[in-house]
Amino acid sequence: SVLKISLFVGFLLLGLVSMSRAECWHKELAEGATQCEDSVDNTFHDIGAKWKNSKCNDCSCFEDNMKCCDG
């Protein structure tokens, strides 16, 4: 029925809105750095590491920057 289709499309659109709110940020590393510092937990992670901090941010440490995204 039209009502079922409308409800399905409505829930689908709500799901897309919540996914689009994921926010990411980058932090540049000092030249020669071998670790990234997670300022949320004050922890250090080696280049190449991936982790989830206490605020459920998904983070990755790269050679020149650290990237975290809302989890």
Image (cartoon, grey):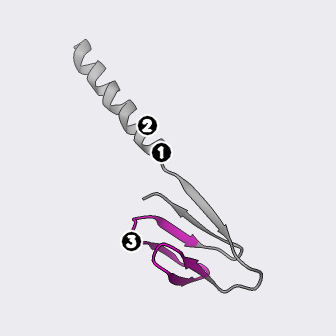
**Span of residues in magenta:** 36-60
What is the distance, in whole Å, between disc 1 and disc 2 at their CAs? 7 Å
Q: Within the image, what quadrant is residue 55 found in?
A: bottom left
The residue that label 2 is drawn on is: 17
Is 34 located above or below residue 25 in the figure? below
Q: In what quadrant of the picture does the N terminus appear? A: top left
Q: In this figure, what is the number of numbered marks? A: 3
The residue that label 3 is drawn on is: 54
Badge 3: residue crowd in 10 Å (few <14, some 14–19, many ≥20)? few
What is the distance, in whole Å, between disc 2 and disc 3 at their CAs? 24 Å
Say which residue appears at 47% left-offset and 45% top-offset: 21
What is the distance, in whole Å, between disc 1 and disc 3 at their CAs? 19 Å
Name which of mark 2 and mark 3 comes first in the sequence: 2
Badge 1: residue crowd in 10 Å (few <14, some 14–19, many ≥20)? few
Is 49 located above or below residue 4 in the figure? below
Q: Are marks 1 and 2 in contact (CB under 8 Å)?
A: yes
Tell me the element at label 3.
loop
- For discs 2 and 3, the disc positioned in front in the rendered view: 3
Is 33 on the left-hand or right-hand side of 25? right
Q: Are marks 1 and 3 in contact (CB under 8 Å)?
A: no
Amino acid at circle 1: Arg
Say which residue appears at 54% left-offset and 64% top-offset: 68
Q: Position of residue 67 (x, y in %)?
A: 59, 66
Instruction: Please tell me whether residue 58 belongs to the stretch shown in magenta.
Output: yes
Amino acid at circle 3: Ser
Instruction: Please tell me whether residue 50 belongs to the stretch shown in magenta.
Output: yes
Tell me the element at label 1.
loop
Amino acid at circle 2: Val
The residue that label 1 is drawn on is: 21
